[in-house]
């Protein structure tokens, strides 16, 4: 509603037979309840990706207001985590 997160749209699904062109966008949204917040640690974020079965998830300000701050992909999360582990080992 307004500025609040209501889900992720998958472009391929918008053009598929699932959408007859008449369905409201909200009805096509996925991962409505799977969001990340900035205070999450890597483990919790990774678990959220796994539970949702998503490749990308919205990052929202907090669970209550759900104002979108950005989008994070699981691959980016894991790549950055691996980089930080490697850096810590070298130090």
Image (cartoon, rainbow, N blue to C red):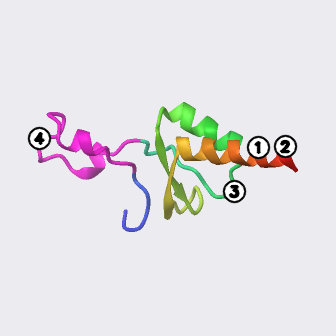
Contact? badges 1 and 3 (CB < 8 Å): no
Confirm whether the magenta stretch covers residue 13: yes
Q: Earlier in the sequence, mark 1 or mark 4?
A: 4
Q: Earlier in the sequence, mark 2 or mark 4?
A: 4
Q: Earlier in the sequence, mark 1 or mark 3?
A: 3
> Which residue: 14% across, 34% down?
17
Most foreground residue, 42 or 17? 42
Confirm whether the magenta stretch covers residue 87: no
Give the image location of residue 46, x and y in percent: 62, 38
Q: Earlier in the sequence, mark 3 or mark 2?
A: 3
> Which residue: 76% across, 43% down?
86
Most foreground residue, 78 or 65? 78
> Which residue carries the number 4 mark?
20
> Which residue carries the number 3 mark?
39
Q: Nearer the viewer, mark 1 or mark 3?
A: 1
Whether residue 90 is situated above or below residue 47 in the rendered picture: below
Can you tell which mark lies on residue 89?
2
**70 sits left or right of 3 in the view:** right
Magenta stretch: helix, strand or loop mostly = loop
Q: For mark 4, does the 10 Å Cα neighbourhood hold few (<14), some (14 to 19), or many (20 or more) residues?
A: few
- The magenta region covers 7-30
Q: Nearer the viewer, mark 2 or mark 4?
A: 2
> Which residue carries the number 1 mark?
86
Q: For mark 3, does the 10 Å Cα neighbourhood hold few (<14), some (14 to 19), or many (20 or more) residues?
A: few
Contact? badges 1 and 2 (CB < 8 Å): yes
Query: Distance between the Cα atoms at labels 3 and 2?
Result: 24 Å
> Which residue: 62% across, 41% down?
78
């Amino acid at each position: 509603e307004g500025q609040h997160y209501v889900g992720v749209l998958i472009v391929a699904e918008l053009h598929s037979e699932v959408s007859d062109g008449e369905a409201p966008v909200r009805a096509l949204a996925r991962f409505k309840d799977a969001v990340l917040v900035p205070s999450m640690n890597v483990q919790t974020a990774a678990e959220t990706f796994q539970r949702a079965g998503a490749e990308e998830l919205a990052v929202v300000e907090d669970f209550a207001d759900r104002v979108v701050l950005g989008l994070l992909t699981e691959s980016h999360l894991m790549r950055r985590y691996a980089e930080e582990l490697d850096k810590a080992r070298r130090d």
